[in-house]
Amino acid sequence: QVQLVESGGGLVQPGGSLKLSCAASGRISVVDAMGWYRQAPGKQRELVAVVASDESAEYADSVKGRFTISRDSAKNTVLLQMNSVQPEDTAVYSCNEKGQLSSGSFFASWGQGTQVTVSS
């Protein structure tokens, strides 16, 4: 069983910055993909950014050039640096990690979600 704990959400003004963190705990052998997703009220959950084990990253077009995803594989942690945030970035942000347990089983776990509100 893998638990993901997120932190860093909150209220930020348009044009401001925020940094989200997600740490995984459990009997993890290796984490492959780590990603951030978001869901705004009345909308479907969407991928924000994902980083692979080789640290290659992909971003939603709406956040390219503003958000940066990074990982600390030694700590099974994924970060999302959010710059130049806009009101349309307001959503619940959730992290997701996929990998393998020490038992050999595969896992895919979600964090509980953290609210990000962009407003003046």
Image (cartoon, rainbow, N blue to C red):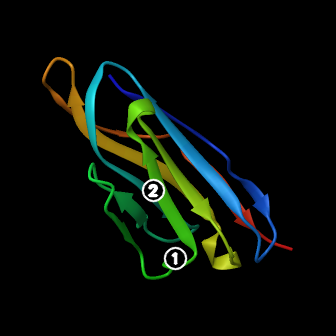
- Is residue 11 or residue 78 the one in the foreground? 78
- For disc 1, the marked residue is 63
Judge from the rendering whether residue 62 lies leftward or rightward of residue 46; answer left or right: right
Q: At 49% from the left edge and 81% from the top edge, which residue is drawn?
A: 62
Q: CA distance from mark 2 to mark 1?
A: 12 Å
Q: Which mark is residue 5?
A: none
- The quarter of the rendered structure image containing the C terminus is bottom right
Where residue 56 sits: x, y (%)?
A: 31, 62
Q: Amino acid at mark 2?
A: Trp
Mark 2 burial class by Cα count in 10 Å: few <14, some 14-19, many 20+: many
Where residue 47 sits: x, y (%)?
A: 40, 65
Q: Which mark is residue 36?
A: 2
Judge from the rendering whether residue 120 lies leftward or rightward of residue 71; answer left or right: right
Residue 74 falls in image quadrant: top left
Looking at the image, residue 99 lies above or below residue 46: above
Secondary structure of residue under mark 1: loop
Residue 17 falls in image quadrant: bottom right
- Is residue 117 or residue 99 the one in the foreground? 99
Mark 1 burial class by Cα count in 10 Å: few <14, some 14-19, many 20+: some
The mark that comes first in sequence, 2 or 1, is 2
Q: At 27% from the left edge and 48% from the top edge, which residue is drawn?
A: 53
